Image (cartoon, rainbow, N blue to C red):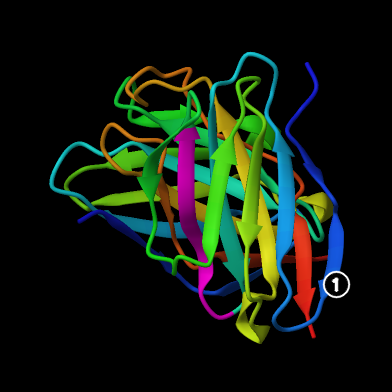
Amino acid sequence: AQSVTQLGSHVSVSEGALVLLRCNYSSSVPPYLFWYVQYPNQGLQLLLKYTSAATLVKGINGFEAEFKKSETSFHLTKPSAHMSDAAEYFCAVSVLNTDKLIFGTGTRLQVFP
Amino acid sequence: KAGVTQTPRYLIKTRGQQVTLSCSPISGHRSVSWYQQTPGQGLQFLFEYFSETQRNKGNFPGRFSGRQFSNSRSEMNVSTLELGDSALYLCASSSGGVIETSTDTQYFGPGTRLTVL
């Protein structure tokens, strides 16, 4: 069975600091991985996705994630946090050959001035 | 292109009632999936419809049902509401088929927040 684990339910950074949100996956087959962001009272917005084309994936709003098979990780990073990045971030893996997504428990990012 | 739309955005019901939520996918998308989001259980997959057929189903009781129309619009129904059904219900659409193609991504609507009193 496929699953994802997000380490840290809350992450706080200062504006301008590096953002690192951790996600580890479990999958018996090459996974398709996603990062979504959710702002208060809104749905999920796709940040980026990994579908085996390249291990370093660039997304919107300056975010990127690197797929590391040896570490079964897909951590999300941004070099410099902005106040507008404050939101909840979800890592997800798709079940093979379906549209079903399995989500992690989410990480709430706070950005302090 | 217009995004995924969900109606209504907010709903208040009492225990024992039933409710129907609606989702209109992005134009041209044929797959619609439904998710339940709660503080305790997080985001959980309910079911997916493709070309009017349920293609996948999550681990929810039979009180939760859905359907898809020929224009790909989908409805979700919950009967005999319980307090624990209070949640944000999210709908997502994709072009359908298998997700191996890099363009087949799920796009989410704003959700319907259901409160059961």
For the C terminus of chain B, the image quarter is bottom right
Chain ID, mark 1: B
Q: In x, y percent, where is residue B36?
A: 58, 62
Badge 1: residue crowd in 10 Å (few <14, some 14–19, many ≥20): few
Q: Residue at x 61, y 82 (%)?
A: B84
Q: Residue at x 76, y 55 (%)?
A: A39
Residue B97, quarter of the rendered image:
top left
For the N terminus of chain B, the image quarter is top right
For residue B53, above or below residue A5: above
Mark 1 = which residue? B12
Q: Is residue A33 magenta?
A: no
Range of magenta residues:
B40-49
Which amino acid type is shown beneath numbered disc 1? Ile
Is A13 or A63 nearer to us in this picture?
A63
Q: Is residue A1 left or right of residue B108?
A: left
Q: Magenta segment, principal secondary structure? A: strand
Residue A55, quarter of the rendered image:
top left
